[in-house]
Image (spheres, rainbow, N blue to C red):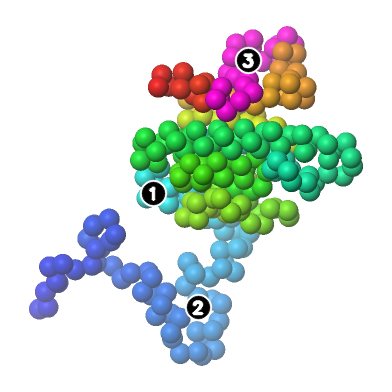
Amino acid sequence: MARAKKDGPRRRDGVWDPLKDNVADKRAAAGQPKTPQTLSPSYRLAYVDEDFLSREETRPIRLQLELMKAEMMLAERGIKSTVVLFGGARIPAPGQSAWAARNEIQRQNLEAASVFYEEAQKFAALCGKHSANHNHQEYVVVTGGGPGVMEAGNRGAAEAGAPSIGLNIMLPHEQAPNRFVTPELSFNFHYFAIRKMHFMMRAKAVAVFPGGFGTLDEMFEALTLIQTKRMERIPLILFSEKFWRGIINFDALAEFGTIAPEDLNLISFVETADQAWKVIADFYEH
């Protein structure tokens, strides 16, 4: 009787696995003779059949895959914690025109808001500097991967020599990640819910810059998780107290009774990158 080789088939993690490798079968299937049977959609291996995986009935599988892919790749990279940057995609870099402005007032507002691009860039550089002290496994910058404040975050990290993550999503005006995202840490999502989950899964702090509906959605998601103790309390930092108090009357919520007065303590207002990092350093007693 034939004996198995002593150093036979093993998985990447070193575990013995005598079953046929799925990648090998994928290659073998691609090389099969072209007949009416092998060319039929029903004959495709299920895990390489994009039409099958895109069916309405397989949505739960797609949700699981979006959760698993980024999680596995971040774990393989050894990333233990992140600092999340949320903020407006329409805020330009200093000296650039406001591409999203519809009138002169909007143009002036958005171009004046380039100061937040600068602060996001500086803040991400600070995070990258401290991340280097942890072999770039802690305090890794993560953004939505798009333009504006997101670009500033990835740019600041890159300028500090640190990797950064981009969690992009399929949107009409943001079809490609910004060029400062570390390519191996650039992810693309279909489901907003799974993307937002990845933002929070490793977060040690959340910094929120002025932005629109998307930024508000992300901010309130994080704030709600902390308030309801669905996640550990972490620093939630809002850049520009004037902006945030101008669009959200936090005190009115407490006065009315729809939130507790102590819930207001979950938020830290700052104006500069240095102030934001101090909030984080004080919280974790660095």
**Percent x, y of residue 37:** 51, 86
The amino acid type found where label 2 is placed reads Tyr
Of badges 1 and 3, nearer the viewer stands: 1
Q: Residues within 10 Å of mark 3 (few under 14, many from 20)?
A: some
Which residue range is magenta in the image? 254-276
230 left or right, relative to 264:
left
Q: Nearer the viewer, residue 89 or 197?
A: 89
Label 1 close to label 3 by CB (< 8 Å): no
* Mark 3 residue element: helix
Q: CA distance from mark 1 to mark 3?
A: 36 Å
The relative height of residue 79 versus residue 170 in the rendered view (above or below) is above
Is 264 a magenta residue?
Answer: yes
Is 116 a magenta residue?
Answer: no
Q: Residues within 10 Å of mark 2 (few under 14, many from 20)?
A: few
Name the residue located 59 percent from the left edge and 19 percent from the top edge. 268
Q: CA distance from mark 2 to mark 1?
A: 36 Å
Looking at marks 2 and 1 on the same chain, the residue that comes earlier in the sequence is marked by 2
Name the residue located 48 percent from the left edge and 34 percent from the top edge. 127
* Mark 1 residue element: helix
* Mark 2 residue element: helix
**Percent x, y of residue 207:** 58, 30
Tag shown at residue 223: none
* Quarter of image, res 17: bottom left
Name the residue carrying label 1: 77
Is any part of residue 73 visible from this angle?
Answer: yes
Name the residue carrying label 2: 43
Looking at marks 1 and 3 on the same chain, the residue that comes earlier in the sequence is marked by 1
The amino acid type found where label 3 is placed reads Leu
Of badges 2 and 3, nearer the viewer stands: 3
**Percent x, y of residue 247:** 77, 25
Name the residue carrying label 3: 264
